[in-house]
Amino acid sequence: MYYLGPEGSFSHQASTLLSGKLIPKPTIKDIFVAVNNSLDALGVVPVENSIEGPVNETLDNLFAFDGIYSVYSIEIQIDLVLASKSDLSKVKKIYSHNHAIREAQNNLEKLGVTNFVPVESTSKAALMANNDRESAAICSSFAAKLYNLEILYDKIQDGVNITKFLVISKKMRTDGNKAIFLFTVPHKPGGLYRVIEKFYLKNINLTMIYSRPLRNTPWNYYFYLEFENFDNLSTLEKDVREVVIELKNKGSYTKLT
């Protein structure tokens, strides 16, 4: 089981809901590469946050790796803390993941904290704060304790903060209660409408739609679409292929509790 490390990350917390040896990876792409190289491996990657929206790196890697699919989802309540080895008056910079920075930025600015340094994960931030007494980390309380940091402020996130993680695999499943399609459409009026119409006619509920730029074609985009209450995923895929340029069926998944 691969997760976004180091130890103490929210991805680590999410991965503990599954059995198997837990192996940290430094980036989301590294998790995709590891899963892609092993038929039986699983990976846990963040896909969406209730405050900040989709995690673009995960979406882009789902699009790039054709043979990797979603099989489960995990939702984690994100309670962020500000932690350090020093008093706040001695802190000159704050380490954290970009998403966590944005999720806590309003509250921290009220405390006069504005010098943020993005790093790969909240647990990496805690590790760096452990080695730098003039810094602090936005991280989980678990990570703060793991890296011997004192919690200066608790629950610094803005509002209710939940992150959804996907469990990814090289084995597709089609019996979950939600599914994911990635696709591109013709660059002409009604291109996206004709896709959405397929779901409307089958009474399929869309739960998320998001566009991302195609890296090799400026000002062109692919769409990430999640949906539920579908009867036959393969039949739906066939229907949608009639009106798109490219379609990547990422299978279905079930929420773990």
Image: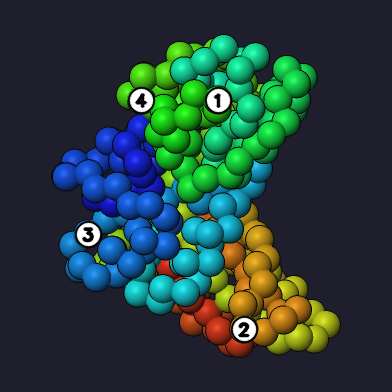
Q: Quadrant of the C terminus?
A: top left
Residues at marks 1 and 4, CA–CA distance in whole angstroms: 15 Å
Q: Which residue is mark 4?
A: 147
Q: Residue 41 got which mark? A: 3
Query: Is residue 241 found left or right of 185 in the rendered image?
Result: left
- Residue position marked by numbered label 2 in the rendering: 216
Q: Position of residue 58 (x, y in %)?
A: 49, 58
Badge 2 element: loop
Q: CA distance from mark 1 to mark 2?
A: 41 Å
Relative to residue 70, is residue 113 drawn left or right?
right
Q: Please give the name of the residue rendered at 35% of the width and 74% of the height, measured from the top-left corner.
A: 67
Of pointers 3 and 2, the one earlier in the residue sequence = 3
Three-letter code for the amino acid on which mark 4 is drawn: Tyr
Q: Around disc 2, counting alpha carbons within 10 Å, would you say few (fewer than 14), some (14 to 19), or many (20 or more)?
A: few
The x, y position of residue 214, in whole percent, is 63, 77
Q: Of the residues shown, which amino acid type is indicated by label 2? A: Asn
Secondary structure at numbered mark 4 = loop
Disc 1 secondary structure class: loop
- Kind of residue at badge 3: Ala
Q: Nearer the viewer, residue 250 or 47?
A: 47
- Amino acid type assigned to the residue bearing label 1 in the image: Glu
Relative depth, front residue between 17 and 197:
17
Query: Callout 3 environment at 10 Å: few (<14), some (14 to 19), or many (20+)?
Result: some
Q: Earlier in the sequence, mark 1 or mark 2?
A: 1
Look at the numbered discs 3 and 2 and tell me whether their residues touch, using CB distance below 8 Å: no
Which mark lies nearer to you, 3 or 4? 4
Considering only order in the chain, which callout, 4 or 1, is on the residue closer to the N terminus? 1
**Nearer mark to the viewer, of 1 and 3:** 1
Residue 206 seen from this side:
no
Query: Looking at the picture, how far across and down is residue 166, in whole percent?
Result: 41, 51
